[in-house]
Amino acid sequence: MKVAGKYKVKPGRRVRVDAMDPDSTGAFKKKDEAVAETESLIRKLDSFQEKLYAENKRSLLIILQAVDTGGKDGTIRHVMKGINPQGCLVTSFKAPTPEERSHDFLWRIHQHVPARGYIGIFNRSHYEDVLITRVHDQVSDREAARRFREINDFEKMLVQGGTTVLKFYLTISRDEQRRRIQDRLDDPRKRWKFNPNDLVERRFWKDYARVYAEAITATNTAHAPWYLIPANHEWYRNYLVARIIVSALKKMNPKFPPAPPGTAPGKIKIPV
């Protein structure tokens, strides 16, 4: 089985996010081997992105979801470090503003989907409106089911319009989350990232596992698949995400557009 296929959720399968081993490192025995492979993938990603931007016909949307400290920021920083920022847009979705709350829950999302030629990355996304809202009983199960249908329709519309959609759930263990939160408190360089609310949400660990499983099961489609990524080891997480993105771009096969008529080599001489 190909690496991407191993972590891709099969449509119709009932998901259990706590069944994934977050410590998995696949076939790799050494970190250095995975890091070297990742660097090679990042170079390929840069080449594909340049062609996607030049072609200006299609786009790629990458959705990253995880519990607090799950590694969304780190994934973006490491995997996307080699591409031209001119063709990549990152959007982090926080709590909705009063204006955003006055619209449907997808209104603020649609404004940030990538335009043709771009790679868009969502650090959290429209899925927050069927995750945290359910854990804290802000929406009913019936409302959540309606939102699942609307999300599927929304993502299908994006795909039909030329956007490839990849959805990643980065899974870490509860012990690893504790270690990362403690590390933020102990390291002066990371202390700014500590949010006291992370300790509050940590109490709902099992509830988040349940709603994530239900959301992923309900919104995993052939046109917008979910990938469950073991993320206790950052280097393996980066490798998997990079490999899956490169595989998707390879399938998209973007190409440089032809030169304008009359501009073939030797046809035009630039005046001195």
Image: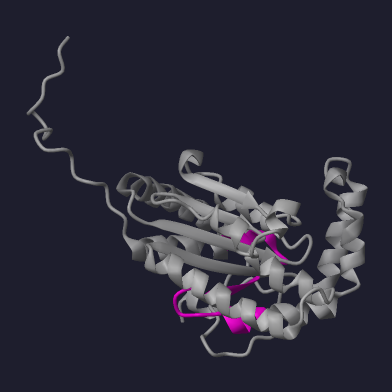
Q: Looking at the picture, tell me which residue is in the foreground, 77 or 111.
A: 111
State the image coordinates of residue 107 (x, y, percent, origin top left): 60, 59
Q: Is residue 121 magenta?
A: no
Residue at image point 70% right, 64% down? 233
Residue 211: quarter of image: bottom right
In this rendering, does residue 19 appear at all? no
State the image coordinates of residue 244 (x, y, percent, origin top left): 49, 66
Query: 205 left or right of 219?
Result: right
Residue at image point 64% right, 65% down? 104
Q: Looking at the picture, tell me which residue is in the foreground, 6 or 225.
A: 225
Q: Looking at the picture, tell me which residue is in the foreground, 256 or 40.
A: 256
Find the magenta span and give its range.
215-239
State the image coordinates of residue 223 (x, y, percent, origin top left): 44, 75
State the image coordinates of residue 124 (x, y, percent, origin top left): 67, 60
Taking 149 as reference, is 133 above or below it? above
Query: 63 left or right of 115?
Result: right
Taking 159 as reference, is 88 above or below it? above
